[in-house]
Image (cartoon, rainbow, N blue to C red):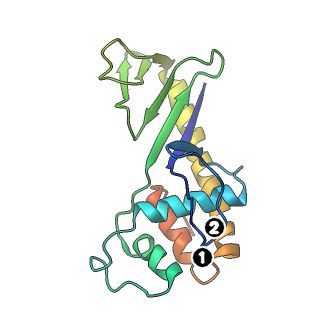
Amino acid sequence: MVMQPVLEIFAADDFALWPVGEHESYSYLVLDGKRTPAEVGTAVMRIADCNNLEPDEHGPCPTDPLGAFLHGLLTVPDLFAAGGFRVADTATGTGCSYFGHDPSSAAERVGDTVRLTLDTYAEDGSPVIELPVDQVRALITGAQTDLRNFHSLAGTWAEQHLPTHAAAVTDALARALDLEITK
């Protein structure tokens, strides 16, 4: 059984502000410390794009392309990352639940078991994964570690690819990923 933090990815056809990986639209990118620089660039691009709001809402928008693209990420107080957690049964290859995005997954505690349902609105039933509560806690701890490792990797990436914005981007990513980072 595996729980992974994932980010919804769209194809970045004409993106040229920094190197990004090639991904199919509407796929998921695992956020952990094992990503390539291009995958980290894709994740930063996607999170910045999720927060690319109307410039007037958070002060004047910079006129340079990089500053304009990062403006929302660097100025919006409550950041958003389109994604969540994916839980999959790796032993059988069956059952997969996504939490934080469509379909409408659910986690329900029944005694000492947690029942993860892929799609609560499925008309013909939905795949269900049942796990002991302690295993779910361990999976969540592992997923949190993956996010922290990704954040550390993204900080190094930002120093290399966005040196003048590295600290601000790294702090913004921590907020978008809902991480408490101690300095």
Task: Give the amino acid type for the residue marked by disc 2 in the picture.
Answer: Gly
**Quarter of the rendering occupied by the N terminus:** top right
SS for tag 1?
helix
Tell which of 91 and 60 is nearer to you: 60
SS for tag 2?
helix
Q: Is residue 181 above or below residue 70?
A: above
The x, y position of residue 70, in whole percent, is 48, 74
Query: Residue sitting at 34 percent across and 31 percent down?
Result: 104
Query: Residue sitting at 71 percent across and 74 percent down?
Result: 160
Q: Is residue 19 above or below residue 11?
A: below
The x, y position of residue 42, in whole percent, is 59, 58
Label ID, residue 155: 2
The x, y position of residue 111, in whole percent, is 38, 15
Query: Residue sitting at 59 percent across and 54 percent down?
Result: 148
Mark 1 neighbour density, 10 Å: few (under 14) some (14–19) many (20 or more): some
Task: Give the amino acid type for the residue marked by disc 1 in the picture.
Answer: Ala
In this rendering, position of residue 74 left or right of residue 160:
left
Tell which of 60 and 176 is nearer to you: 60
- Whether residues under marks 2 and 1 lie with C-beta atoms below 8 angstroms apart, the answer is yes
Which of pointers 2 and 1 lies earlier in the amino acid sequence?
A: 2
Separation (CA) of disc 2 from disc 1: 7 Å
Q: Quickly name the residue at label 1.
A: 166
Q: Is residue 60 above or below residue 78?
A: below
